[in-house]
Image (tube, rainbow, N blue to C red):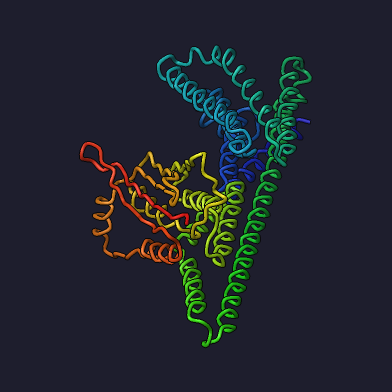
Amino acid sequence: MELLFFDFSSWLQGMLFILIAYHAISYFFTKDKSFAIYACYLFLVLVYLIPKTGNKVSNYLLDNFEGFFNAFNWIIQIWFWMLYAWFTIYFLDLKEKNIRLAKNMGMFIVVTTILSTTFFIIDLFLLDMKYMNLFFTFVYTPISLVIVWLIIKAIYSSESKLNAFFAFGLTSFLGFSVVALYLSITMDSYTSSYIRPIDFFMIGVFLEAIILSIGLGYKYHIYRQERDSYNTLLISEFKKNETLKDQLNEKLAKKIETHKLSEMEALYEKQINELKLTSLLSQMNPHFIFNALNSIKLYIINNESKNAAHYLNKFSKLIRKILEASTAKEVTLQEELETMDLYMTIENIRFSNEIDFQISINENINLKNIKVPPLILQPFLENAIWHGLSSKKDDKKIMLSIHKIDVGHIQITIKDNGIGRTASAKIKSDKSINRKSIGIQLTEDRLSNFVKNLKHKYSIIYEDLVQNNKAIGTNVVLKIPLS
């Protein structure tokens, strides 16, 4: 029997070493922190077991490093419990499932680790390890119980496919640990020469390591499936958008072909104006589209599947609205605001959602009855972001407000708290490559075409906001005629 347990402990230590190497290598390939944390946890467990197993390798290490193992015995147990709790947060994606519990666990881990390690250093170097047993008896046990309670709470609060793996792994570890503790208390000296409590503890560790290793593999498999699914969805949306674009081009080509040169000059001019409007709409900054896709791609790479799906859905809706608007000369103000809200949501990804974008509407205004050129507000919002707010570090705000100033006009105000037009112009002039923006000029051309047959005219006013001789933002006031 002793020979059997001797061989078992050597075999188990070898298996743990292999699993540590497996998880360490897996981390470098997957960049999933779960693998790295679990590899560190298993390594500390392996170190903890060395002075307790009694095989040749353990005895050799114990003979040469006895002082180290005696001194670090209890603090290693604290450390591997903290790593286990930290692993729980990442393995169960607790930051997405229950962010409050994840923060509480993280705080407990940090505080416990710092205090325990500090006491350990003081006890080791200043107090000659006088209080090690006292600390282990009255502090280690409550800490372990709290960690187990937090882990069980995490399992119940996380609606994850991986819960079963974690529950079985934790049950195996705790179950065999309790058996080992019970045997260490109740066994007499004769029985203990054949059956060692530490072997039951090692069985629990091994079963837990195997179950959670399979769970980690399954987790990465799920991630790969979700990533492939999102890539497929993204490609599908691209194809749909390309189809819509081709249909639009075909429709425009047919319209041009069906009109003959002998048609009335007014009809010809109207057709040209509509085509010009469509062309202007199609010139939306391609950098915005590519940057948005790169931002969504980053969410996919970082395994933030919910954010990727959320923004991919928003981006798809925005592209559809842009393509639909390409066939319309005018849209309702409500549709325009919905499109701008989508646009700002996508642009805000690159600023880590730091921009506070708000829309204020006078309660007496019926947005469905007011017509405006589609995407008419986009260039002004783009200017507010990239010329006003992009160079600012924090407190980034854009307020879009709508008022009816008289019977014939609606007033749209876009106010930002950026660096101002003067500072923005200086930054632009300092750049080695100075690209001229044509968005505002195109907007003015479209507004001129839009109001051609209306009684009232449009106006655009730029106001520099200044306080104590310091620029505090820009105000753009756009007056659009209603009739």
123 up-or-down from 30: above or below: above
Residue 353 vs residue 243: left or right?
Answer: left
Residue name at image x 42 percent, y 47 percent:
406
Residue at far left of view:
469
Q: Is residue 299 visible?
A: no
What x and y, as percent, mark residue 329? 52, 65
Residue 3 vs residue 292: left or right?
Answer: right
Nearer to us in this view, 118 or 356: 356
Residue name at image x 31 percent, y 44 percent:
473
What x and y, as percent, mark residue 71? 50, 23
What x and y, as percent, mark residue 86? 57, 33
Nearer to us in this view, 134 or 221: 221
Residue name at image x 31 percent, y 51 percent:
462
Residue name at image x 65 percent, y 59 percent:
233
What x and y, as percent, mark residue 422? 24, 51
Nearer to us in this view, 28 or 385: 385
Nearer to us in this view, 346 or 406: 406
How many marks are shown on the rendered structure? 0
**Image quadrant where residue 205 sits:** top right
Q: Is residue 21 visible?
A: yes
**Image quadrant where residue 236 sits:** bottom right
Residue 155 vs residue 20: left or right?
Answer: right
For the N terminus, give its image quadrant: top right
**Image quadrant where residue 101 sits:** top right
